[in-house]
């Protein structure tokens, strides 16, 4: 036998299929896997002793925003390491309707407004998937796959206008989507609580989901409401996918806000019925009771209807602030009113680049300390930061989180928003937290179930060919972990602290994490996802 590049010996293999662990040696040659009998003693350039440890496929984070990474070069490098240290070898970005492509040159400024409003100023936007892939694929340690954001398509064609798209505009959005999916984008995403996606009719989204269905790629949705109207929002998503003939992925499924606590009993049952009726529907979930988004998303959608500059100008007007107060108190039809369903005491500043002293504090406390009304404080902070403020929203209940985590229809995600400051600890801790807290400490899942939700299940859902399983000929993306020690280190106060128990991470056959050390290897790239057949009915 020709010499292997890497041989991992003595480990218990959990192969990502959901089947029980078994003992085997794992070989790597030319970036591909070769499973061998235990004790094979095959010649190898590098041998790793995994005795007493578990070897799994590399983890796939199905919901990130890492294509919109912000900060200076040093901050960006630190942020990039967080998922890698916990074993994430592939991230799927472009979620919640926001992607930095495809952006026609004439509308680049409008799309930059969209991205800046949610995640801060991006480094760039790109006319096509190919140009995005070429730029993002430079010197990466792990892989990216990318969805096409509906909000980006709408901003590029319609702008922020609060109206229905015309048939011609819908067709132009469909054409942009079709081109990106044909080039290798992984699916279509929507963020129907965010402007401009909030302005879209159900019919508009159905038309776009039909394009995704033609490529056999999923419709991935941040529902129009995850709070008091979550059940009707879920029905809309099911209607869209059913009408379009598309697979449905419900993003970061939750029932947030006091008025919807406990509703996962009904939403998960609804997903199960839809699947029994023939709809290829799954969801993902992060293992925390707090969410994270842009501060402006706490305000009524009309506030940002005309883009960030217009929003900032409007927020200076007292009449606008009074109108915001009234809408937060009374609500608006079809609007996910986070503050109305919770309160400013549950909203904590995560990132305010020029005001770091406010990070980690609630809006209620910050306003009280300054002796001002919370709305006035929010408007002033957004103005000071030119709209670039991220928050944490402590709005969920633990039993709902556990219920979704345990569902056979759910896979694991981080919904990571990689920004400087005090980002949500999910970016650095989600996968390690599931392995440590929910598998070992709580016993909510078995280790094999959890690994399946992190590997084989997401690889199948998003068409990541020859990834997500430990099988002969598959890409050599691997994690070696200690199940007795695996745990998240990240907290709300120290959100980028590394996890424990992740001993080694391998990407395309290259060791990128070796104990506490991150190596210089950078084998990652943007993965082009080909059109594919749907999985057989009934298979997640």
Image (tube, rainbow, N blue to C red):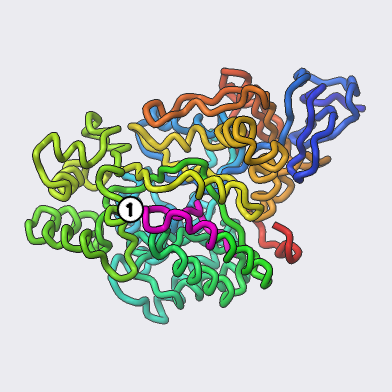
Look at the image and tell me whether residue 216 can be seen.
Answer: no
Is label 1 in a helix, a strand or a loop? helix
The magenta span reads: 248-266
Q: How crowded is mark 1: few (under 14 residues within 10 Å), some or many (20 or more)?
A: many
| Residue lying at 37% horizontally and 76% vertically, measured from the top left | 165
The x, y position of residue 254, in whole percent, is 47, 53
| Residue lying at 13% horizontally and 34% vertically, measured from the top left | 369
* 506 sits to left or right of 345: right
Q: Is residue 397 on the magenta stretch?
A: no
The x, y position of residue 311, in whole percent, is 19, 57
The x, y position of residue 21, in whole percent, is 80, 35
| Residue lying at 67% horizontally and 72% vertically, measured from the top left | 277
Q: Quadrant of residue 364?
A: top left
| Residue lying at 26% horizontally and 38% vertically, measured from the top left | 362
Badge 1 is on which residue?
112
Q: In which quarter of the image is the C terminus?
A: bottom right
Furthest residue toward left: 318
**Along the viewing direction, whichever of 370 and 4 lies nearer the viewer:** 370
Q: Quadrant of the N terminus?
A: top right
**Along the viewing direction, whichever of 501 and 326 lies nearer the viewer:** 326
Q: Is residue 258 on the magenta stretch?
A: yes
* 502 sits to left or right of 299: right
| Vertical arrangement, residue 321 with respect to residue 489, above or below | below
| Vertical arrangement, residue 182 with respect to residue 463, above or below | below
Q: In which quarter of the image is residue 195?
A: bottom left
């Amino acid at each position: 036998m020709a010499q292997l590049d890497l041989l991992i010996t003595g480990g218990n293999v959990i192969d990502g299929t959901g089947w029980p662990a078994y003992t085997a040696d794992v070989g790597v040659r030319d970036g591909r896997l070769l499973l061998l009998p235990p004790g094979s003693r095959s010649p190898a350039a590098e041998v790793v002793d995994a005795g007493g440890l578990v070897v799994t496929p590399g983890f796939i984070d199905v919901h990130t925003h890492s294509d919109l990474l912000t900060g200076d070069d040093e901050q960006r490098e630190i942020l990039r390491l967080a998922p890698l240290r916990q074993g994430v070898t592939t991230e799927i970005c472009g979620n919640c309707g926001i992607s930095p492509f495809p952006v026609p040159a004439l509308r680049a400024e409008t799309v930059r407004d969209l991205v800046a409003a949610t995640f801060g100023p991006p480094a760039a936007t790109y006319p096509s998937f190919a140009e995005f892939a070429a730029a993002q694929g430079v010197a990466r340690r792990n892989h990216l796959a990318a969805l096409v954001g509906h909000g980006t398509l709408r901003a590029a064609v319609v702008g922020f206008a609060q109206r229905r798209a015309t048939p011609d505009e819908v067709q132009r959005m469909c054409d942009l989507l079709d081109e990106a999916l044909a080039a290798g984008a992984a699916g279509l995403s929507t963020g129907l609580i965010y402007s401009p996606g909030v302005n879209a009719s159900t019919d508009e989204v159905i038309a776009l989901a039909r394009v995704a269905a033609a490529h056999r790629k999923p419709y991935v949705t941040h529902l129009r409401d995850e709070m008091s109207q979550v059940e009707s929002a879920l029905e809309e998503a099911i209607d869209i996918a059913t009408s379009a003939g598309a697979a449905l992925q419900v993003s970061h499924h939750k029932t947030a806000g006091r008025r919807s606590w406990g509703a996962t009993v009904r939403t998960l049952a609804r997903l199960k019925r839809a699947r029994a009726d023939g709809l290829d529907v799954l969801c993902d979930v992060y293992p925390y009771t707090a969410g994270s988004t842009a501060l402006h998303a706490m305000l009524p959608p009309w506030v940002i209807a005309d883009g960030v500059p217009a929003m900032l100008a409007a927020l200076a007007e007292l009449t606008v602030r009074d109108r915001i107060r009234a809408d937060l108190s009374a609500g608006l039809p079809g609007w996910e009113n986070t503050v109305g369903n919770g309160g400013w005491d549950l909203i904590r500043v995560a990132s305010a680049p020029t005001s770091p002293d406010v990070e980690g504090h609630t809006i209620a406390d910050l306003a009280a300390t300054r002796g001002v009304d919370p709305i006035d404080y929010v408007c002033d902070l957004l103005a000071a930061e030119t709209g670039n403020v991220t928050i944490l929203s402590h709005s969920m209940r633990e039993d709902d989180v556990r219920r979704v985590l345990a569902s056979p229809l759910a896979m694991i995600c981080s919904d990571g928003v990689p920004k400087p400051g005090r980002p949500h600890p999910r970016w650095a801790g989600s996968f390690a937290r599931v392995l440590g807290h929910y598998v070992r400490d709580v016993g909510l899942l078995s280790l094999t179930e959890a690994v399946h939700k992190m590997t084989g299940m997401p690889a199948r859902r998003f068409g990541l060919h020859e990834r997500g399983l430990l099988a002969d000929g598959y890409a050599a993306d691997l994690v070696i972990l200690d199940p007795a020690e695996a745990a998240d280190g990240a907290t709300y106060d120290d959100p980028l602290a590394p996890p424990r128990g992740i001993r080694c991470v391998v990407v395309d056959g290259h060791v990128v994490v070796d104990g506490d050390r991150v190596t210089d290897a950078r084998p990652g790239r943007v993965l082009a996802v080909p059109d594919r057949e749907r999985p057989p009915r009934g298979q997640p």
